Image (cartoon, rainbow, N blue to C red):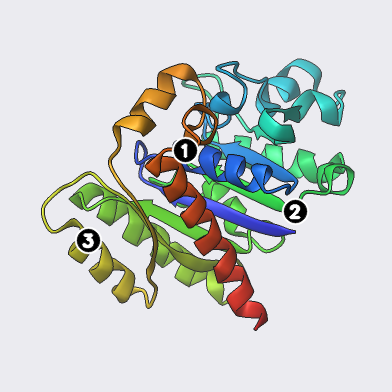
Amino acid sequence: MLKMAFYGKGGIGKSTTVSNLAAVFAEQGLRVMQIGCDPKADSTVNLHGGTRIQTVLDLVRDKNDNFSLDEMMHIGYRGIACVEAGGPVPGLGCAGRGIIAALEKLQKKGAYESYRPDIVLYDVLGDVVCGGFSMPMHKGYADKVFILTSGENMSIHAAANIAMAVDHFRARGYATLGGFILNRRDVPNEDAKVEELADDFHSRIIGRIPRSRVIQEAEPLYQTVIQAFPESDAAACYRTLAKSILATFQEETC
């Protein structure tokens, strides 16, 4: 089982990227689980044709612990097991607690043993990396962290903070940095700025996603690019990224 967490500034395209990667892995015949760790609970919406699934925090609020694994884990496109952590009632509670609750409930109810995924993807809100938002980095959850960024200054600043958190946790045996994913916004010197960021953390850019009209057109269809435009250049880009991600795991076994 390969477990990977995706972080980055809000709005950088994590959910779009993670859902497309999930679709690629699923079309390769792998058993995939996608866990949305964002209070907006929209990570998996394109794997369900626009339907938002019930979140773990909603279940906890409604039923305490009296709910089944099937109520928190919903099967989407090509058998992808989808989970949304959810968030607190607006103005009350801590969003990070939703992530902690979701991951604890998944383990308690035997999700990994029952579904037996080959790939687990955590889609994590990454503007801050503290409390529950750092949970997927902890030992026993993700093995590698991949950071999405563009060449925009705020995106690079957020990516650097996330990379520093990964570096800090590394001594505890937590997830390691798998690399940076450049989600282009076509700003000046974009490649050079992100390459410099990667160099600062002794890492590399493992994928470059172009700014594409096709990606934007798939969104209102509530489908991934892999579903809506499987023969497009953008779909080929996600397939290449998936291959690069798998290669980072294979490097450690060589």
The residue that appears at 69% across and 59% down in the rendered structure is 2
Q: Residue furthest front?
A: 231
Q: Disc 2 and disc 1: Cα gap in Å?
A: 25 Å
Instruction: Find disc 1 in the rendering and name its residue.
Output: 231
- Judged left or right of residue 160, residue 235 is right
Position above or below: 186 against 98: below
Q: Quadrant of the C terminus?
A: bottom right
Crowd class of label 1 (few under 14; some 14 to 19; many from 20; radius 10 Å): few
Q: Quarter-wise, where is residue 179 in the image?
A: bottom left
Instruction: Find disc 3 in the rendering and name its residue.
Output: 191
Callouts 2 and 1 close, C-beta under 8 Å:
no
Point out residue 236 in the picture as x, y percentages from the top left corner.
45, 47
Position above or below: 188 against 114: below
Point out residue 177 in the picture as x, y percentages from the top left corner.
49, 67
Position above or below: 243 against 249: above
Amino acid at circle 1: Glu
Q: Quadrant of the N terminus?
A: bottom right
The residue that appears at 54% across and 26% down in the rendered structure is 46
The residue that appears at 10% across and 53% down in the rendered structure is 188
The tag on residue 118 is: 2
Crowd class of label 3 (few under 14; some 14 to 19; many from 20; radius 10 Å): some
Point out residue 13 in the picture as x, y percentages from the top left corner.
39, 39
Q: Disc 2 and disc 3: Cα gap in Å?
A: 32 Å
Which sits earlier in the primary sequence, circle 1 or circle 3? 3
Position above or below: 38 against 18: above
Secondary structure beneath dot 3 equals helix
The answer to whether residue 92 is visible is yes
Crowd class of label 2 (few under 14; some 14 to 19; many from 20; radius 10 Å): some
The tag on residue 44 is: none
Q: Quarter-wise, where is residue 174 in the image?
A: bottom right
